[in-house]
Amino acid sequence: MGRKLFVGNLSFNTDERRLEELFQSVGAVDTVNIVRDQMTGRARGFAFVEMQSEEDAQSAIQLARILNVQKVLMGAVAKLGTTMTITVQMVDVETAAIDGSREVQCRACELEDLTQAMSELAQTVVAEPEAAVLGYPEPPEIRLDYPREGVEVSGQSVIVRGSILYSKPLEGVELLVNGRPFDASRLLDRAGGKATRLADGTLSVPFVQEVPLEQANTLIAVRAVGADGNDEQRYVSVRRAASPAPGAPGAAVAAPAASQAPGISLDELSSALKNRVPAARIGNLVSRFGVSFDVGATESRLREAGADDALLRALRAARRTAAPPPA
């Protein structure tokens, strides 16, 4: 077996320190990783613990099995300086006889810390992780090009732009502004739901959307959901610059170039065609925003993606814009 253990059925209040102290009672611990929700930071109820040796990992599994079946008898408690030692006596699962003891130690902790921790471990599943668990892919990657965290902009809106990539098909994208859902991108439609659904087999999608700044501070959240249920979230706060009072010296903060709506990119247009956005809608948005790519040089790719003659004419007539500046 390996050195990495899967620990499930954890209390949502369990933290890394408490979990590490539990496993240090049977051997040396390399790493403790409690899996948490990226948006809220709340524990999801399971973790991975890596021991320094396979022998320690096996001991941890055996201890957990005993604790899961039989009550733990808390023995003597000794405290020397900042180190506390609790002797834990265990009951043999077959004979009901006391089967040895183990010492649990921690530094700068209180008695209730360890008693609570031992109680939690008694309800915990500890096992060598299955291949399916170890093979669970990393969550979707959200690249948020703009805005940056805490940026201050003038005007009544800001352009949110970036891209999402995943090793497996994506199911949808959510864009929330102060908790209110928006279309995840100007070329995509959430059709009244919270999430903007994507075409089957979509592995990547760019997004560009203008969102209002109705408050002095606006929280923008982007969430990507894989078809397998794996998800990821990114959020950023934006401050709206206050205008100076009439007659006061100074001018309003100028909106940075990065906050202006860029022309529609080739990737953005290809994604819209794959998601069957009506050509008329694409044509209207192309006329409004322009394009940031050479239409003539990419015509064959656009036709393969589903662009018809009318859309190609609209693209040729659209103004050419520069690519968006780096954030």
Image (cartoon, grey):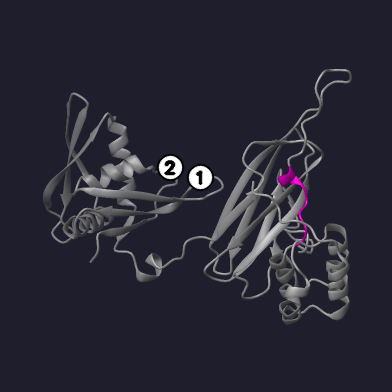
Q: Specify the amino acid type for callout 1.
A: Gly
Quadrant in which residue 215 is drawn: top right
Instruction: Tell me where residue 67 appears, x and y as whole percent.
Output: 25, 52
Which of these two is toward me, 136 or 21?
136
From this view, report whether residue 217 is shown above or below residue 135. above
Could you tell me residue 248's position as x and y percent?
84, 17
| Secondary structure of the residue carrying numbered label 2 | loop
Residue 35 screen position, x and y as percent: 43, 52
Q: What secondary structure predominates along the stretch shown in magenta? A: loop
Position of 180 with respect to 82 (left or right) is right
Residue where numbered disc 1 is placed:
41
Q: Amino acid at mark 2?
A: Asn
Q: Is residue 243 visible?
A: yes
Q: Are marks 1 and 2 in contact (CB under 8 Å)?
A: no
Q: Is residue 142 left or right of 276 when viewed as pictured?
A: left
For the N terminus, give its image quadrant: bottom left
Camera-nearest residue between 261 and 242: 261
Residue drawn where x is 80% and y is 38% of the image? 214
Q: Earlier in the sequence, mark 1 or mark 2?
A: 2
The image's mark for residue 13 is 2
Q: Quick check: 246 above or below 67?
A: above
> Which of 50/114 is in front?
50
Q: Is residue 72 visible?
A: no
Q: Where does residue 185 sit, x and y in percent of width and height?
A: 74, 59
**Is 25 contained in the magenta span?**
no
Tell me where the magenta segment starts and ends, as one range: 257-264
